[in-house]
Image (cartoon, rainbow, N blue to C red):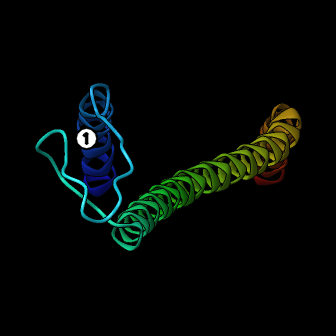
Amino acid sequence: MKKLSSIILVLLLTIPTISFAQDNGKVMRLEEGTSAPYAGLLLDDVGFATLMAKHKEELKLLELELKFGFAIKIFELQQKVDMQKVLIDTQEEGREALAEEYKKLADKQKYFDYYLLGGFVSGAAVVALIVYLVK
């Protein structure tokens, strides 16, 4: 991320200065032996072609670095999205399991009163039978 920010910062700082520097530039074709009408940098066709090739190469490298940085960031964000999806799926499965367990407990609870009443009645019947047999 730091590298991507640095590249963008360099681009933002250099592109405007390059364009401002070329606003007042003069281009003139000189033949051999002709004196230059102003002081400046003189390039032959090969030098100019070399300079342009280097410029295009640097632009291509910057473009590739930006694409690579974006690809890394997209990959990182996609991983986060995938992790969140897994978390959501896991939570939904857990919620479904809890709902199923709750249903089972609710079914058992539905008959609890009958079991309690049956236990009390059978216990009272056993005590009454014992009392009757002892007398």
Residue 25 appears at what percent x and percent y?
29, 33
Residue 5 appears anywhere in the view: yes
Q: Which residue is mark 1?
A: 14
Quarter occupied by residue 61 = bottom left
Q: Residue furthest front?
A: 33
Number of callouts in the render? 1
Nearest the camera: 48 or 10?
A: 48
Q: Residue at x 49, y 57 (%)?
A: 63
In this rendered view, identify the residue nearer to me: 64 or 42. Answer: 42
Graded by Cα atoms within 10 Å as few (under 14), some (14 to 19) or many (20 or more), the crowding at tag 1 reads: few
Residue occupying image coordinates x 56% and y 53%: 74
In the rendered image, residue 47, in percent from the top left (x then y), is placed at 33, 70
Q: Is residue 112 left or right of residue 72?
A: right
Q: Residue at x 18, y 53 (%)?
A: 41
Task: Say left or right for 65 vs 7.
Answer: right
In this picture, is 116 found above or below 50? Answer: above
Residue 15: x percent and y percent?
32, 37
| Residue drawn at point x = 35 percent, y = 64 percent | 51
Q: Position of residue 3 (x, y in %)?
A: 28, 57
Q: Is residue 65 left or right of residue 17?
A: right
Q: Amino acid at mark 1?
A: Thr
Give the side of residue 22 with respect to residue 66, left or right.
left
- Element marked by disc 1: helix
